Image: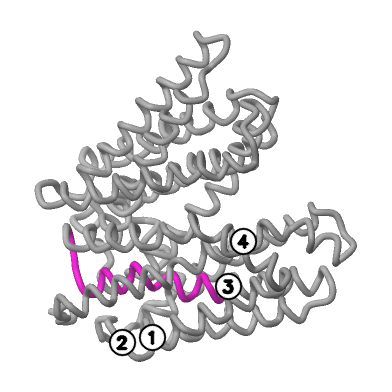
Amino acid sequence: MDKEPAISTHNVAQLILLLAGLTAIAPLAIDAYLPAMPLMAAEFAVSIHDIELSLSLFLAGFAVGQLTGGPLSDHFGRRRVIFIGLTLFCVASMGIVLSHTLLGLWIWRVVQAIGGGMAIVNSSAVIRDISSGRDSARYLSHMAIIMMIAPLVAPLIGMVCLHLAGWHSIFIVLFVYALLIGLLLYRLLPETRVKAIQTTSALKRYIEVLSHRKALAYLAAQSFTYGGLFSFITASPSVYMIYFGVSASVYPLLFAVNVLMMIVVNRINVRLLHFYDPPCLLKLGQILQVITGLTMLLYILISPAPALAIIVIGIMIFIGSQALIVSNAIASTVEFFPRSSATATAVLGSFGFLSGAASGLLVSSLGDGSLWPMITVMSGCAIAGLTLKTLILHSCQEHPQNKTDC
């Protein structure tokens, strides 16, 4: 039987820090250039919506990168795919800097996203390679706490770069950051993939993940919680700045408190993992999200003028609960696929992004200037995730197909 690679406690701490830095590439690449969008639109002589499309293309490319990088990593090893992905990311970042057309921006953003997705999908896979069960969930929570700094500082980095050297410097910073992470990983990251003869094709590995009913249950949980998160991200500017009338300088603070809440809950999750298994804490997070979502729905139903403070607190609890869901869902899923953990992680990540994109589109289409679309979609995602996961697990217990499936 293959054993997990033996890595010292000190080296594990180093790896978690580096893997968090690797994973932070995604929020940095998404959020850092948001302040520069109007200037980029003016320089390319296009509408800001054309520049915004580059963000959608990035999300799509990121999902493709994850789906590609997962099975490649399981077959060829973590290190090789990470460095291929980071190389693509760096080349594309410089391609964006040198782009003079909108089409060039779009193409290089897709390439950048594919490279980023290929590299980042390995973070959770490496954690699974070196740990399992509660240890795996604890490491993922530690990694999540560190990488959550990125969404807090990314817009600030973008704004500073924009004022000092123009929008091109944002992508130069991304290039330098990815290059430094790659050099550190090259020096400090061992090959952690369990060495075994891999005779299963990528398609069969994906089918293996998607046909495992318990894995599907946890996949549903993570996908719908991402849907709730992106519902908030999509609607929060109009809700906070237009409905409640807060200023543009206050809005980032109201957004940041949710990230801080997730950090706090992540710390709580790490502590609780000493006493409870990941599936138990996953369920706790889902129940908390459902209760919070329904409470906010009831509040805006009975209140003619909802108070900003109450909505902010409710959203903080809702978004904070995601910290109990995501890391425990990943840990619970990859536990079933020791030889294909990167493939399983790729499925989790890509479905999460797709769910987030769909919920964001739904919120936008339902937007009527009130709180209802955002709170309704957030609550609906929470209810759907818990319900679907419960039904699948119940079906698994009632009608097990085989011991490996259920």
Of mark 4 and mark 3, the one earlier in the sequence is: 4
Please, what secondary structure does the residue beneath circle 1 have? helix
Q: Residue at x 17, y 81 (%)?
A: 7
Main SS category, magenta section: helix
Q: For the residue carrying disc 2, how many other residues have a C-alpha within 10 Å: few (<14), some (14-19), or many (20+)?
A: few
What is the three-letter code of the residue carrying label 1? Leu
Label 3, label 2: how far apart the Cα atoms are: 24 Å
Query: To which residue does mark 1 refer?
Result: 184
Q: Going by the image, does 308 lie left or right of 169?
A: left
Q: Residue at x 57, y 64 (%)?
A: 157
> Given contact means CB atoms under 8 Å apart, are the residues at marks 4 and 1 in contact?
no
Residue 95 falls in image quadrant: bottom right
Residue 90 falls in image quadrant: bottom right
Q: Residue furthest right?
A: 45
Task: Give the x, y percent position of residue 325.
Answer: 33, 46
> Given contact means CB atoms under 8 Å apart, are the residues at marks 1 and 2 in contact?
yes
Query: To which residue does mark 4 refer?
Result: 60
Q: For the residue carrying disc 4, how many other residues have a C-alpha within 10 Å: few (<14), some (14-19), or many (20+)?
A: some
Residue 114's label in the rendered image is 3
Please, what secondary structure does the residue beneath circle 4 have? helix
Can residue 124 be found in the magenta stretch? Answer: yes
Of mark 3 and mark 2, the one earlier in the sequence is: 3
